[in-house]
Each structure stands twice: as structure tokens, then as C-alpha cells.
Amino acid sequence: MSEIRLATAADAPACAAILQSWLDATPWMPKLHNYAETEGFCRDVLIGAQRAFVVGDPPAAFLAMLPDTGTVSALYAAQGARSQGFGKGLLDRAKAESDMLELWTFAANGDAQRFYEREGFIEIRRTEGENDERLPDILYRWSREARQ
């Protein structure tokens, strides 16, 4: 697997393309933002204000997290890079930096749920759509303490 490295502003277009491709290919996901807005979000929020990691150059996958809280706010892989260990590698990097991680995934995203559960996350709670998309979602948590 390619080296995992900290993301830079130069990675924002590739990360935005990965995220926008997933959004566009997901029929149940409301289309709330255009590509320019997605790129700005990746550049200013995920990379600019959080701790973000990428795999590959250009990135094939990325993860963004709030290091002080252990909240993973984004984990996406390009269509052709899925099921190749990139997401696991990025999640392992986040686990190495935190004793506890939390993240949300949409209830409709069964693939993500199965992935996070395989990686040791447990379901904490569900909502009926307390997010921008107004879609039901699930909060997952992983802790180093629970793994020992």
C-alpha cells in the first residue's frame, strides 16, 4: 500500500473529486452542494481546519478527523481504490493517534456499517436525520480500552 501522509491544500482537488464521485453515485444521497463547494469544504475544513491524511499521490483515499475529540469527519476512497485496504490503513493511522474515535455513518450505508463493525467500532446511537442531509444516521465508537 502507498504511504499514508498528512494532506496538504494541494490534495484538496483530488479529495473533492473522491467525495463528489461518491455523492454523485449514491442515489439516496441528497445533492446539496456542487463540485466547487465540495472542493472548498475539502480545502478549508477537512484539510485546513482538521487533521487529514491521504494515501497515494494523487490521493486514492482520505480521512479527516478532529484530533482533540477523536471525531472522524470523513473517510472516502476513490471508486477504483475501494476494497484494497486504503480505508483500513487510514483508520489504523487515526487509531494510532487517539485512544477513542467516533464517527457517523448514514443508516442507508450498509457497506460502511459492516466495515466499521469489522474494524472494532460499536453502535452508540441512531438519529432520524439530525444532519444536513436529514437522513437517518448512526454514531459509532471505537476505543483502545475496549480492545484490550
Image (cartoon, rainbow, N blue to C red):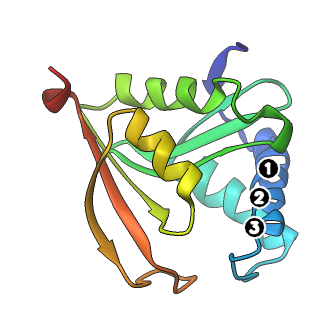
Other residues around mark 2 within 10 Å, as few (<14) / some (14–19) / many (≥20):
some
| Lateral position of residue 10 relative to residue 115, left or right | right
Label 3 near label 1: C-beta < 8 Å? no
Q: Badge 3: how crowded within 10 Å, few (<14), some, or many (20+)?
A: few
Vertical relation: 102 (above or below) 32: above
**CB atoms of marks 2 and 3 within 8 Å:** yes
The image quarter containing residue 53 is top right
Q: Which residue is drawn at 34% across and 78% down?
A: 127
On screen, residue 34 above or below 63: below
* Percent of width and height locating residue 114: 48, 45
Image-based side of 51 in relation to 61, left or right? left
Question: Residue 26 bears which disc, if any?
Answer: 3
Q: Where is residue 146 in the image (x, y as percent from the top left)?
A: 15, 32
Quadrant for the C terminus in the image: top left
What residue type is disc 1 on? Ile
Marks 2 and 3, how far apart at CA: 6 Å
Quarter of the image with the N terminus is top right
Res 55 seen here? yes
Pair 1/3: label in front: 3
Query: What residue would you read off at disc 1?
Result: 18
